[in-house]
């Protein structure tokens, strides 16, 4: 029998294709049912997503959609704030002729109007400064003086310290200081002074802080031999911070530009230490509670150190059994927070340090947030777990002067138990044609004014000033927490906070805390949004009176949220709600990247 191939082949291909289609669909159906039964719908979506992202062009499509959502989000934010964040592809040039002082002062006034007043009591992060006569002076000693020094004492120190430095205006320097003299620099100083008002410095003390900053604002701490005063500011600031945290005379460290740099320095130090002492470790790891600050994730990314996170127990403490299990042959460092930012809770540093002693590992305690408040809260009689150099096994700490130390931004310290550890932080390069190069930290150039102001604030505040600050802050903190616990059935305080920071979460599914944050923002309050809670840092600008207004507005916003469920689909509540439902968190990372990529454009 003859077969007409020309007629039968298309029919055969169609039949075969239909058969294969049924087979593929059958396999897909069986796999789908299996995953749904064994792993659940969420896991199924993740697996499905992994298949889609392998399709050519799919990632480009997703990126385009994310960019569109970012622009919409920025547009909505611009409507709320009145600030123009919309990218306009502008070319902005340095003016051909320098603007006059009058023109710049007009700009300055307009710029200030758009900022939240740090003294309004409606901020719960970012600005930690008080309005008082203590915020500008400081003296010299190797620990924070028991009583803050007077203006006269500090100004005498200022004059004596300046005598040892090379005058940047003498014409005898050929590096380090590039500033001009004359009316242009005066205008720059006025701009600085105006924005320095955000520190909430009282007028009678403002001139002291400005005097220290201005006296050293041209000086550069890149070379400690050129400006001896800056070296002294740094080593004495480190020594005072170390003493506050119960370090002995062996503790050394650096003043950095902020908590992130302190953390970067610490992780770089321990990575390089492990490279020298344990060269067989080629994939170093560090263990941390899941509440550790994201700066450690940044450091892990920068320095190629894997970070293994430990989940929390029901009391919001890291699961210690899981913590120990995470320690392995590649572990080079254990991490803890005092306190962790989100909930204001101190990690069990003593127990983590016991693991370190057992396995021969170092421990870094991140006290960037709590370092300059917890010691004083403890002195007031509050129950604060031991977290500092009193704990055997703690080998380094980080603490921010520009938070509860009330110093200028940005200023932090990274402290090491001894020089044998700190030496791994230092970078040296001796093959440069320009000479021998060395740097103690991440930054090369470091502004002398910040070092001087940091030294000064510790001296002028004194232990008495910090104790008084802590007493006032804790009075407001206790008042708000007690009111929420007693009179707000829809909210609760998360865990057992140890200082002047805490988080509030909802007991009622009809009350979304992210909706509350949006509603409170409409009333002028700037609350910090966490994944499932609202964060409150009590600042020197907060009082019992402002707290009563806060609680009244919060009560009204709860009522509004209950009446209008649609609010959960708007504003930041919608963004965070979307984040919780995404099958792949990399999409959310992409959203954040695109947000910053868009908003920092003209």
Image (spheres, rainbow, N blue to C red):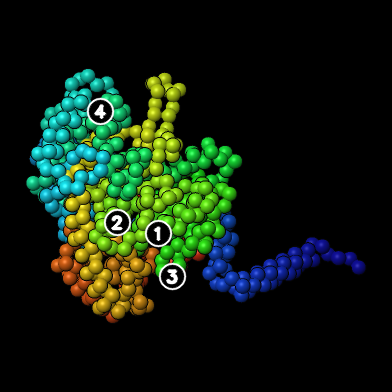
The answer to which of marks 1 and 3 sits earlier in the sequence is: 3
Give yes or no for contact between labels 1 and 4 (Cβ–Cβ under 8 Å). Answer: no
Relative vertical location of residue 410 with respect to residue 343 in this rendering, above or below: above
Give the labeled residue for mark 2. Answer: 374
Residue 156 visible in rendering: yes
Give the labeled residue for mark 1. Answer: 347
Relative vertical location of residue 308 with respect to residue 536 in this rendering, above or below: above
How many residues crowd mark 3 within 10 Å: few (<14), some (14–19), many (20+)?
few
Q: Is residue 44 left or right of residue 208?
A: right
Which residue is depicted at the point 53% across and 69% down?
42
As helix, strand or loop, the secondary structure at mark 2 comes to helix
The answer to which of marks 2 and 1 sits earlier in the sequence is: 1
Q: Nearer the viewer, mark 1 or mark 4?
A: 1
Q: Position of residue 179 (x, y in %)?
A: 21, 29
As helix, strand or loop, the secondary structure at mark 4 comes to loop
Is residue 367 or residue 539 the one in the foreground? 367
The answer to which of marks 1 and 4 sits earlier in the sequence is: 4
The answer to which of marks 2 and 4 sits earlier in the sequence is: 4
The answer to which of marks 2 and 3 sits earlier in the sequence is: 3
Q: Nearer the viewer, mark 2 or mark 4?
A: 2
Q: Is residue 360 left or right of residue 376?
A: right
Give the labeled residue for mark 3. Answer: 314
Tell me the number on the disc at residue 227: 4
Q: Is residue 35 left or right of residue 367?
A: right
The answer to which of marks 3 and 4 sits earlier in the sequence is: 4
Q: CA distance from mark 2 to mark 4?
A: 34 Å
Q: CA distance from mark 1 to mark 3?
A: 14 Å
Q: Position of residue 95 (x, y in %)?
A: 20, 35
Q: CA distance from mark 3 to mark 4?
A: 52 Å
């Amino acid at each position: 029998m003859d077969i007409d191939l020309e007629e039968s082949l298309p029919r055969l291909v169609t039949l075969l294709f239909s058969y294969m289609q049924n087979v593929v669909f059958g396999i897909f159906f069986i796999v789908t049912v299996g995953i749904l039964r064994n792993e659940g719908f969420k896991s199924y979506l993740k697996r499905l997503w992994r298949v889609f992202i392998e399709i050519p062009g799919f990632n480009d499509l997703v990126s385009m959609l994310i960019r569109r959502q970012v622009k919409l989000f920025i547009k909505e934010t611009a409507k709320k704030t009145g600030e123009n964040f919309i990218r306009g592809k502008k070319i902005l040039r340095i003016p051909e002729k320098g603007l006059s002082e009058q023109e710049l002062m007009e700009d300055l006034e307009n710029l200030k109007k758009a900022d939240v007043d740090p003294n309004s009591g409606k901020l719960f992060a970012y600005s930690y400064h008080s309005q008082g006569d203590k915020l500008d002076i400081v003296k010299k000693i190797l620990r924070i003086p028991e009583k803050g020094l007077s203006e006269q004492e500090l100004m005498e120190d200022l004059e004596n310290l300046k005598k040892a430095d090379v005058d940047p205006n003498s014409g005898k320097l050929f590096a380090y200081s590039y500033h001009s003299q004359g009316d242009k620099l005066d205008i720059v100083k006025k701009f600085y002074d105006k924005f320095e008002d955000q520190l909430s410095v009282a007028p009678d003390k403002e001139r002291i802080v400005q005097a220290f900053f201005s006296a050293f604002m041209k000086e550069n701490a890149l070379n400690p031999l050129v400006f001896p005063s800056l070296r002294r500011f740094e080593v004495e600031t480190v020594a005072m911070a170390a003493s506050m945290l119960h370090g002995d005379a062996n503790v050394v460290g650096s003043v950095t530009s902020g908590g992130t740099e302190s953390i970067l320095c610490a992780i770089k130090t321990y990575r390089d230490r492990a490279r020298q002492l344990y060269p067989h470790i080629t994939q170093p790891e560090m263990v941390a509670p899941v509440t550790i600050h994201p700066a450690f994730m940044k450091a892990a990314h920068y320095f190629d150190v894997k970070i293994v996170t430990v989940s929390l127990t029901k009391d919001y403490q890291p699961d210690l059994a899981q913590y120990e299990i995470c320690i392995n042959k590649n572990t080079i460092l254990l991490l803890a927070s005092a306190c962790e930012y989100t909930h204001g809770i101190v990690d069990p540093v003593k127990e983590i340090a016991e693991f370190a002693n057992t396995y021969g590992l170092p421990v870094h305690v991140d006290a960037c947030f709590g370092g300059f408040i917890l010691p004083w809260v403890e002195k007031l009689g509050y129950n604060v777990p031991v977290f500092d150099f009193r704990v055997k096994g703690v080998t380094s700490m980080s603490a921010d002067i520009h938070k509860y130390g009330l110093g200028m931004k940005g200023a932090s310290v990274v402290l090491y138990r001894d020089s044998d550890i700190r030496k791994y932080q230092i970078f040296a390069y001796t093959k440069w044609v320009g000479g021998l190069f060395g740097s103690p930290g991440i930054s090369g150039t470091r502004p002398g004014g910040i070092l001087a102001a940091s030294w000064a604030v510790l001296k002028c505040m004194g232990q008495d000033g910090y104790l008084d600050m802590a007493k006032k802050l804790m009075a407001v903190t206790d008042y708000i927490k007690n009111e929420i616990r007693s009179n707000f059935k829809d909210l609760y305080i998360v865990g057992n906070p140890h200082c002047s920071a805490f988080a509030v979460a909802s007991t009622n599914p009809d009350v979304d805390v992210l909706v509350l944050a949006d509603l409170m923002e409409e009333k002028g309050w700037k609350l910090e949004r966490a994944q499932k809670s609202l964060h409150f840092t009590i600042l020197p600008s907060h009082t019992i009176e402002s707290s009563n207004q806060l609680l009244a507005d919060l009560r009204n916003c709860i009522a509004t949220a209950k009446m209008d469920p649609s609010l959960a689909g708007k504003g930041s509540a919608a963004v965070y709600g979307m984040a919780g439902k995404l099958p792949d968190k990399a999409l959310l990372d992409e959203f954040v990247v695109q947000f910053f990529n868009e908003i920092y454009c003209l």
